[in-house]
Image (cartoon, rainbow, N blue to C red):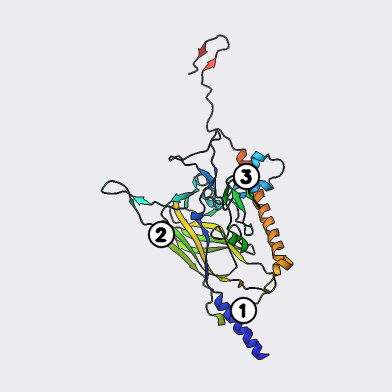
Amino acid sequence: MKRTFIFVVMALLLIGSLAFADEATIIDFTLLDSDIIAEKDAEGDDVTDAEGNVKYTQNARTVMDFGTTAGATFTDEQKDLMKTSLSLPNWEVVFNSSARNVLSMSKSVVVPAPVRTEKPNVKGGEPLPVNLPFAGKNIMGVRIVFPTPNVNANARIIPSFEIPAYEPLRTVTVDGNVVVGDASGEIAYEPAEEDVSRGFTRFEGGYGVVKNVGTIKALSVTTQGMLFPHALYVLLKDTDNIERRYFMGYLGFDGWKELKWKNPAYIDEVRTREIRIVPIYPRGLPFVKFVGFQIVRDAMHAGDDFIGYFKDVKVIYDKAVLHTERDIADEDLWGIVGDREAAKQNHEMARFGDKQVNRFLEKAKLAQEDGFKSSLSMEEDSSSDTKVDAK
């Protein structure tokens, strides 16, 4: 009996040592380019840039159709417009109460920021190529207008919807339709068969979610500093719906840098850890998902514009569960995890849909006129056939 206990303890220590320090990208903003659903002008034509390229509004991999929860009162044309994604222009800047004012909310935006690929030739002639990190990629560019009074202010940079943790991989058409099975129409994104067979969800792989996360050992943010003295936090949410804030450091530097947070409570030595034994099945895979950034401006620092650039967020973590081959396909037999995840997914979609439908309704009520129609115009005189210039 004693010998068996020793073997069990040794096995647990070995498992713990093998489970350490996996690295994954939680979110990579260079993956969030707009590549589907063209922007339309007042006449319904596609909007193009200066080079004649069509401007797109959504990201195919992360597009979500909340028209499915809008109800029967909306027309099919209206429901076609009820799509959003993690495309960078869809991200929002949300202020705390003391920093919230009309100017700050109207001028603070998130945009794709292209990293240049060439520089001017001082000797004349063609521009010269440059060797820069992420050259030719679009990263997240943020403008935040903090209030000028001496008040503590902070702003959260968040997506337009909470990233779902249980959304399955789906095929997406160029019209932004998320389909199950065979797609009717041109396909913009189709998941790899390997990812489907491994049970990946839509927002894994650098789109906001990392599964099978136990203890977080460290976090990293790749950012370009602009000598602002503000503090940067990363906001993550876990399986228990608990949001945590991680202090990454201050942005008072110039150029690219990886800001890192290391868990002060992380224990490397297995023998000093508290070993917890949990059932293998039907425990679902714990996860963390990206909620957003928080920029904090101290009252002693100047307000007004803040400009920031972000490339990605990475995590080093212990595995929560080791993947091993089982003699019996537990999930195929019982289906407990699938039922639980389906219920969580439906709950996430319901909350997401209600919020987006309300935003769609509010947008439809916005005033479309930028100015008044002048009353001082050429009018027809009711007493004669002559026209009078009211000016």
Query: Residue at the location (54% across, 38% down)?
Result: 40
> Of residues 83 and 172, which is closer to you in this image?
172
Q: Is residue 72 above or below residue 135?
A: above
Q: CA distance from mark 3 to mark 2?
A: 37 Å
> Of residues 291 and 188, which is closer to you in this image?
188
The amino acid marked with disc number 1 is: Ile
Picture coordinates of residue 16, whole percent (x, y): 57, 77
In the rendered structure, find residue 82 and report the number of the disc placed on it. Answer: 3
| Left or right of residue 209: residue 307 | left
> In the image, which is nearer the foreground, mark 3 or mark 1?
3
- Disc 2 is placed on an element classified as strand
Q: Quarter holding the N terminus?
A: bottom right
Q: Is residue 152 visible?
A: no
Q: CA distance from mark 3 to mark 1?
A: 48 Å
The amino acid marked with disc number 3 is: Met
Query: Which residue is denoted by mark 2 in the rendering?
Result: 256
Sooner in the amino-acid sequence: mark 1 or mark 2: 2
- Disc 3 is placed on an element classified as loop
In the rendered structure, find residue 275 and report the number of the disc placed on it. Answer: 1
Q: Is residue 385 above or below residue 55?
A: above
The amino acid marked with disc number 2 is: Trp
Q: Is residue 311 visible?
A: yes
> In the image, which is nearer the foreground, mark 3 or mark 2?
3
Picture coordinates of residue 179, whole percent (x, y): 64, 50
